[in-house]
């Protein structure tokens, strides 16, 4: 969609993964919005009648600087709703500070 609207650019994997996650959340029946806390962006806030989940989406969580950049906005949210980082690549998908880190493939295979 992005390429159609803006014209083709070099492959931007982060935006491709964001599009995949966005459409998958819609397919699962969520209303999807973009959030902001302080000056940091939360990629998606997915809500339905019974739940709310915050999502960050990134190409890789293997670099410490990227890991920290993706976790900071979710750490700042002070409610108890689920927080998830979805990564295209992640050598160590774990829960850190109450935030689940999952591989994109695993997220897409969830039922």
Image (tube, rainbow, N blue to C red):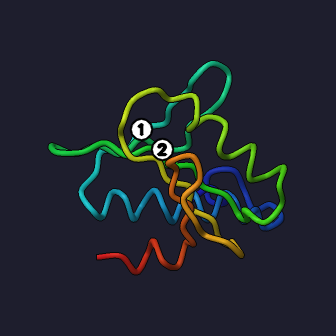
What secondary structure is marked by label 2? strand
- The numbered mark at residue 19 is none
CA separation in Å, label 1 and label 2: 6 Å
- Image vertical order of residue 13 relative to residue 74, above or below: below
Q: How many marks?
A: 2
Q: Quadrant of the C terminus?
A: bottom left
Q: Residue furthest left?
A: 49
Q: Position of residue 72 (x, y in %)?
A: 67, 37
Q: Position of residue 7 (x, y in %)?
A: 72, 56
Residue that mark 1 sits on: 33
Residue closest to the far front: 97
Q: Disc 1 vs disc 2: Cβ atoms closer than 8 Å?
A: yes
* Residue at (84, 49) in percent of width and height: 65
Within 10 angstroms of label 2, few (less than 14), some, or many (20 or more) residues? Answer: many
- Mark seen at residue 44: 2
| Residue drawn at point x = 48 percent, y = 77 percent | 106
Q: Residue at x 75, y 45 (%)?
A: 68
Residue 88: image quadrant is: bottom right
**Quarter of the N terminus within the rendering:** bottom right
Tell me if mark 1 has few (under 14), some (14-19) or many (20+) residues whose alpha carbon lies within 10 angstroms of its own.
Answer: few
Left or right: where 23 falls relative to 60: left
Residue 11 percent coordinates (x, y): 78, 67
């Amino acid at each position: 969609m992005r390429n159609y609207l803006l014209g083709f650019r070099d492959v931007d994997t982060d935006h491709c993964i964001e599009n995949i996650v966005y459409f998958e959340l819609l397919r699962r029946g969520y209303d999807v919005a973009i959030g902001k806390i302080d000056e940091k962006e939360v990629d998606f806030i997915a809500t339905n009648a019974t739940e709310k989940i915050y999502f960050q989406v990134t190409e890789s969580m293997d670099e410490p600087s990227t890991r920290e950049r993706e976790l900071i906005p979710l750490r700042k949210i002070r409610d108890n709703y689920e927080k998830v980082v979805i990564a295209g690549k992640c050598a160590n998908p774990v829960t850190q500070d109450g935030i689940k880190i999952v591989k994109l493939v695993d997220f897409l295979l969830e039922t």
